[in-house]
Image (cartoon, helix red, strand yellow):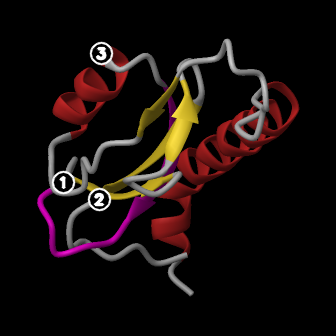
Amino acid sequence: MNFKGFKEWGGYVVAFLALFLILFFFVNSVTSNFSEDESVERVVVPNVVGKTLTESVEILNDLGFWISNGFLIESKEEFGTVVSIFPPAGSYRSRGSLVELSVSGGSKSFNF
């Protein structure tokens, strides 16, 4: 175990996990994507995988979605590139629903 790596990144990881849990419970308690209410406009979730985080947020906000932090994932993709999206691209969601984006942290590995 590399404790130096933990000291450097441990606080960030704990803060990120806490934020993720708060947003997860907020999404589950507030958002109802399976509503039968026909007055709610539903739109298709676009595929933003491979785009930068900035581009992805702009596209999703223009469609009326809120953005939630996903995970920072070790990837061959450039740092800040969206590597996954939930709900999946192509699914229908209500305007105002949360979309979770996971972003590449680059290829640097972290030792805990």
Q: Secondary structure at mark 2?
A: loop
Q: Secondary structure at mark 3?
A: helix
- Horizontal arrangement in the rendering, residue 108 relative to residue 87 (left or right): left
Q: Which residues are the magenta region? A: 66-78
How far apart in space, not on screen, are marks 3 and 2 (Cα)? 25 Å
Which residue in the protein does label 3 denote?
62
In the image, residue 90 sits, relative to residue 29, either above or below, namely below
Which residue in the protein does label 1 denote?
79
Residue 21 found in image quarter: top right
Quadrant of the rendering where the N terminus is positioned: bottom right
Magenta span includes 17: no
Three-letter amino acid code at the position of disc 3: Asp
For marks 3 and 1, give the one nearer the viewer. 3
Q: Main secondary structure of the magenta part?
A: strand
Q: Label 2 crowding class (10 Å Cα cut-off): few <14, some 14-19, many 20+?
A: many
Which of disc 2 and disc 1 is earlier in sequence?
A: 1
- Horizontal arrangement in the rendering, residue 15 relative to residue 101 (left or right): right
Residue 8 appears in the rendering:
no
Could you say which disc has been placed on residue 105 in the image? 2
Identify which residue, 63 or 42, lies in the foreground.
42
How far apart in space, not on screen, are marks 1 and 2 (Cα)? 5 Å
Three-letter amino acid code at the position of disc 1: Phe
Residue 23: horizontal and vertical position, in percent?
70, 34
Badge 1 vs badge 2, beta-carbon distance below 8 Å:
yes
Q: Label 3 crowding class (10 Å Cα cut-off): few <14, some 14-19, many 20+?
A: few
